[in-house]
Image (spheres, rainbow, N blue to C red):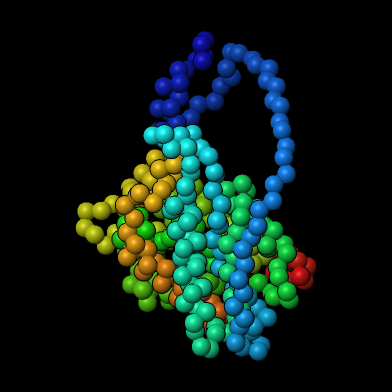
Amino acid sequence: FAGAPQTPEEIYAAARAGSPPVFDLPVTARLRVTSRHAAFESVNILALLPGSDARLAAEAVVVTAHLDHLGLCPPVDGDPVCHGAYDNASGVATLLEIARVLAGRSPAPRRSILFAVVTGEEKGLLGSDYLAHHPIRDLEVVADVNIDGAPGILYPIADVVALGVEHSTLRGPVEAAARAAGYLLSPDPMPEESFFVRSDQYSFVRRGIPSVCLTDGGKSTVPGVDGLARSRAWLTTLYHTPKDSIDQPFDFASAAKGAGLNLDLVERVAAADARPAWNPGDFFGTRFGAARRSGGTAGKN
């Protein structure tokens, strides 16, 4: 920035004020990058619970949670491992508990339920993208419920955000499940993060399949606890670092209630007479719904 019209400090201040400046720096640079490529294999882990309804069993609700993380990271206090306890071991644990409960239901849910612990989310939604393009057997995927971080595990939550709920008829079962659990349903408090298109539900959206992901809303049942501030602090200090470990002060009772919310949502979608559908004129339905209507690999192979 030597000779630039503004200093870095002035640029940062202007950006925080919402008006970042634009100008050319008085220098040029020539860069050369050398890349190395290697092939790796990683697996999706799937379990299928066949539906009990002869008419609806060929339709599947997919429950996803990603099992991968970043591996080795810049060390923090001598620890170089990105453990991924909240993101996303907690989501995988929630999925496993939902699978355990539903496997004991008699009769089973009307629609089939495919439990998918997918790989490569942190590298670009790779595992869920593969699954969305290569569904198993003759199942037609009609919805995805994704779990990326167990709702409520960071603090006792009073409300939830359902990422993607405004785009499809999944709003109905989401609202009913939230109401039954005593949660408020709030709009996304951090829309600038674009979370809806950054996790595994988006792989299914791109195949024309309505999808949703439940996460913390920012309100707490404990007076004086600012849930949104706690979530922002976690994102800025622990996210994708070795500090995302089991040593965090997790609230497992609150997470268990959040798991029950996801369980109820999956059961409601699996039991409904009508499959989820995009809202008329919705951007994602218009942009990606044609792939599903064409009868190609969108949800059925």
Q: Is residue 249 left or right of residue 164?
A: left
Left or right: residue 164 compared with residue 249:
right
- Give the residue at x 54% y 48%: 69
Residue 13 appears in the picture as rendered? yes
Query: For the view shown, which residue lies furthest in the front direction?
Result: 78
- Where residue 37 sits, quadrant-wise, is top right
Q: Does 36 appear above or below 115?
A: above
Quadrant in the picture for the C terminus:
bottom right
297 shown above or below 55: above
Residue 171: x, y in percent?
49, 71
Residue located 47% across and 47% down the image: 83
The outermost residue toward the left is 223
Observer-nearest residue: 170 or 48?
A: 48
Image location (x, y in percent) of residue 9: 41, 22
Residue at the top extreme of this rendering:
3
Quarter holding residue 223: bottom left
Q: Residue at x 60, y 13 (%)?
A: 27
Q: Is residue 113 above or below residue 33?
A: below
| Residue 173 visible | no
Q: Is residue 71 above or below residue 11?
A: below
Give the camera-side residue of 99 and 185: 99
Residue at the spot x=44%, y=42% of the render?
A: 242
Q: How many marks?
A: 0
Residue 169 pos. (x, y %): 55, 73
Residue 273, quarter of picture: bottom right
Q: Position of residue 190 (x, y in %)?
A: 44, 50
Left or right: residue 235 versus residue 297 is: left
